């Protein structure tokens, strides 16, 4: 057996807190957030009510400018976020691998930095835990990676339109209940 090409396998930490030294930040890759179809249908239906009212007003005022609305398929696909695998080594020399989901400032982590990580299990035994919070003990920085969410993916205009549509439906239901 050739031991020169043998590399030790990194462990997945089992605890919630890990204090270790950053060995290597691997190349990142995109991963997609799944969007639940029932949530999307409810938001789009409510937004559609307000959209119909807006089209009616535009037609009456003959503004005629079209909007570039995203399709159901595009919205269902979900946003992507960056996943960066990080290799660490603890004080006992054990190698670990964790995943950083989202973005951090470029100068936030460097190899040889001593860090304390708060980790969360991803529910899949094949995937290493993901980082929730980083305390860079070398620089004294507290870091939280930020990822895209369902609400940032749908966007404020669509969500505002959905709220307006819900309010219109509620007002219409209240009016019909009074009569």
Image (cartoon, rainbow, N blue to C red):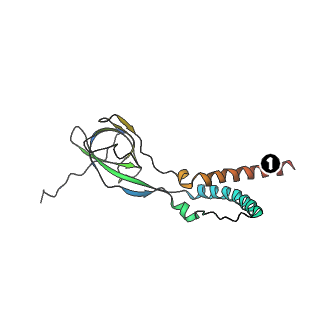
Of the pair 168 and 36, the residue shown nearer to us: 168
Q: Is residue 171 above or below residue 29?
A: above
Q: Residue furthest right?
A: 179
* Quarter where residue 3 is shown: bottom left
Which quarter of the rendering shows the N terminus? bottom left
Residue visible at 59% across and 51% down in the picture: 156
Residue 150 place in picture, x, y as percent: 53, 52
Q: Is residue 44 visible?
A: yes
Q: Residue 142's x, y, as percent?
A: 38, 36
Rendered residue at 63%/58% (across/down)? 44
What residue is shown with label 1?
174
Q: Secondary structure at mark 1?
A: helix
Percent of width and height locating residue 108: 34, 42
Q: Nearer the viewer, residue 143 or 90?
A: 143
Q: Can the viewer see residue 1 in this picture?
A: no
Q: Name the residue nearer the viewer: 37 or 81.
A: 81
Instruction: Specify the quadrant of the image occupied by residue 2.
Output: bottom left
Residue at x 31%, y 47% (from the top left corner): 12
Q: Position of residue 111 (x, y in %)?
A: 26, 45
Mark 1 packing: few (<14 Cα in 10 Å), some, or many (20+)? few
Number of numbered discs overlaid on the protein picture: 1
Residue in front for this viewpoint, 66 or 45: 66
In the displayed structure, 176 sits above or below 89; it is below
């Amino acid at each position: 057996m050739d031991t020169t090409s043998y590399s030790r396998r990194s462990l997945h930490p089992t605890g919630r807190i890990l204090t270790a030294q950053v060995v290597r930040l691997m190349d990142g890759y995109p991963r997609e957030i799944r969007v639940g179809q029932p949530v999307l249908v409810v938001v789009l239906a409510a937004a559609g009510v307000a959209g119909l009212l807006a089209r009616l007003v535009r037609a009456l005022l003959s503004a005629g400018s079209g909007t570039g609305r995203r399709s159901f398929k595009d919205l269902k696909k979900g946003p992507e976020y960056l996943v960066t695998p990080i290799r660490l080594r603890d004080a006992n020399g054990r190698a670990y691998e964790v995943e950083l989901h989202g973005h951090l400032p470029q100068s936030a982590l460097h190899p040889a930095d001593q860090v304390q990580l708060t980790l969360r299990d991803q529910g899949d035994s094949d995937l290493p835990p993901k980082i929730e919070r980083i305390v860079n003990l070398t620089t004294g920085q507290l870091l939280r990676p930020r990822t895209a969410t369902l609400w940032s993916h749908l966007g404020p205009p669509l969500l505002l339109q959905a709220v307006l549509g819900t309010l219109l439906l509620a007002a219409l239901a209240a009016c019909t209940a009074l009569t």
